[in-house]
Amino acid sequence: MEWEVVIGLETHTQLQTNTKIFSGASVKYGAEPNTQACEVSIALPGVLPVLNKEAVNCAIKFGLAINAEIAPRSVFARKNYFYPDLPKGYQISQFELPVVGKGAVTIQVPAVGKNAAYEKVVNITRAHLEEDAGKSVHGAVEGMSGIDLNRAGTPLLEIVTEPDMRSAAEAVAYAKKLHELVQWIGICDGNMQEGSFRCDVNVSVRKKGSDKLGTRREIKNLNSFKFMTQAIEYETRWQIETLEDGGTIHQATVLFNPDTGETRAMRSKEEANDYRYFPDPDLLPLEITEADKARIHAQMPELPEAMKARFEAQFGLTGYDAASLTASRELANYFVATVDKGAEAKPAANWVMGAISAKLNAEEKPLEDSPVSAEQLASLLKRIADNTISNNAAKQVFEAMWNGEGEVDAIIEAKGLKQVSDTGAIEAIIDEVLVANAAMVEEFKAGKEKAFNALVGQAMKASKGKANPAQVNELLKKKLTA
Amino acid sequence: MALSIEDIKKIAHLARIEVSENEATTTLAKLTGILGLIEQMQAVDTTGIVPMSHSQDLAQRLREDVVTKTNQREEFQKIAPVLGNGSSEKAVDHGLYLVPKVIE
């Protein structure tokens, strides 16, 4: 029997603001417990929420970035449940009228095994503004739980997809794309360790060809892409095995245990989803005008999709290269800076995606910590372009620059890597090589094309790699066919 | 829509309100009355009328994203209630508000 997995994601992105969504308390990470928990955060009687303008701006930015409908009028609602980290007894969220409506995100699903890479559109159902809850701390006091309400009221944008994904790879490709996008437009710092970007993944399975959705289980709070892959794969296997053994799937919330690699249903006596939402009488409807949207639109950076198309048109890059370079705003800016400093686009793209990315990956460094700046890379590429050094020598110069041995020209000088382009000097080398390798010359003349390459090799070796390979080729051909 | 005693108990539980059997019966009568009122209102034709989400016909004012609150932990924790299960007399410790142990 062939099964199909159906996946939808709900992502909580913490918005990059200075203050909470409904009060002027700081949201800085890592403060002493409850030092950023004001009277609104701890829900003292009589306090009122006042909506943060920047949180609304962030929601508008996201809506514009995914080409979504932005509601001219949206409403805040109370989601009622009891938990110690939620002192009001309700979370202020949005229910029937969210700020961002239907939109879409285009993802690149990488090649896996024999399956080639492909592009796919994931539809966004909605995105709504809400407040985060506080945090429970266990073990600080015997027999009690401690509550830290610093995080209570932190602005979140919850982004919900349609059940459009059909594999763990697609789900992770979407999550990564969203992760890059929210950082690109500057609404979220993307720090997954600190919980700024958390995913809930809804997984169900059905027989291939069926258009009816199976019963879903929701994997809560995944904060790494690796765990997301593991959790979805485990959950999918578990559901298929359960069904094949004649069992049934019950709707549940499950947690992923990274130590065992398994998902397990949470113990919960709570009535399923009986949150009794109703409009919060403390807040008036949020109105967003065309002028608001235009103002925010003017502040937004060029979006990855647009930049990708521009790279293809302006620099003649392939779709794949353009997509890779626009995977993050930092990478795209670095590439553009390299070109602006005088490098040719194609070699710049190759070096940024090749040498630079490889070094950063190997040393687990972010791009901003690259020891080689865009300007330095550009001067290196210019030395290749003007035939001062060969591609091979450039690799040595790059290595030296990475290790902090100085600027391009100084390194070329110090290491004696300057390419010999003087025709006379190269001819002299070739003449010596032809004398020393008479046998090869005979082979070439007898029709063995391979011997030519061997002679080029000998000439390059004789020049200690410094001869301009194109010139060696040309002059050698001239002499042999003369 | 007719409510049952079971509905009343469920609603009370969700709101964490303890109701005795007697209270459940009187509450059932009261809530049924309110629902009757709503049924009466639902008979009115509201075609083409945008549902109201607030009694005032105004839009939400927004606040600038500037920190205005200072650390008042000490003042707030002075008035924090003791929520012990008998094992603690303290309302706060290590800067945390204390509650009976919650385990997932």
Image (spheres, rainbow, N blue to C red):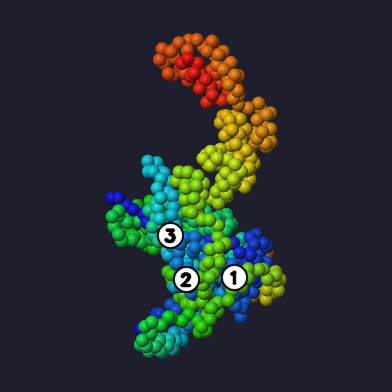
Q: Nearer the viewer, residue A69 or A260?
A: A69
Residue A104's label in the rendered image is: 3
Callouts 3 and 1 close, C-beta under 8 Å: no
Rounded to the nearest angstrom, the CA distance separating label 3 from label 1 is 26 Å
Q: Left or right of A213: which side holds A277?
A: right
Residue drawn at (51%, 62%), measured in percent from left and top?
Answer: A62
- Asked if marks 3 and 1 fall on the same chain, the answer is yes
Residue drawn at (66%, 68%), measured in percent from left and top?
Answer: B66
Where is residue A371 shown, x and y percent of the image? 64, 41
Rounded to the nearest angstrom, the CA distance separating label 2 from label 3 is 16 Å
Regarding residue A337, the answer to whether it shows in the image is yes
Q: Nearer the viewer, residue A281 or A366?
A: A366
Image vertical order of residue B8 relative to residue A4, above or below = below
Judge the density around disc 3: few (<14), some (14-19), many (≥20) Cα neighbours within 10 Å: some
Q: Nearer the viewer, residue A20 or A35?
A: A20
Image vertical order of residue A473 relative to residue A154, above or below = above
- Asked if marks 2 and 3 fall on the same chain, the answer is yes
- The kind of residue tagged 3 is Ala
Q: Which circle's residue, 2 or 1, is located before the other in the chain?
A: 1
- Residue highlighted by disc 2: A71
Q: Say which element carries label 3.
A: strand
Q: Which circle's residue, 3 or 1, is located before the other in the chain?
A: 1
Chain identifier of the residue bearing label 3 in the image: A
- Residue highlighted by disc 1: A52
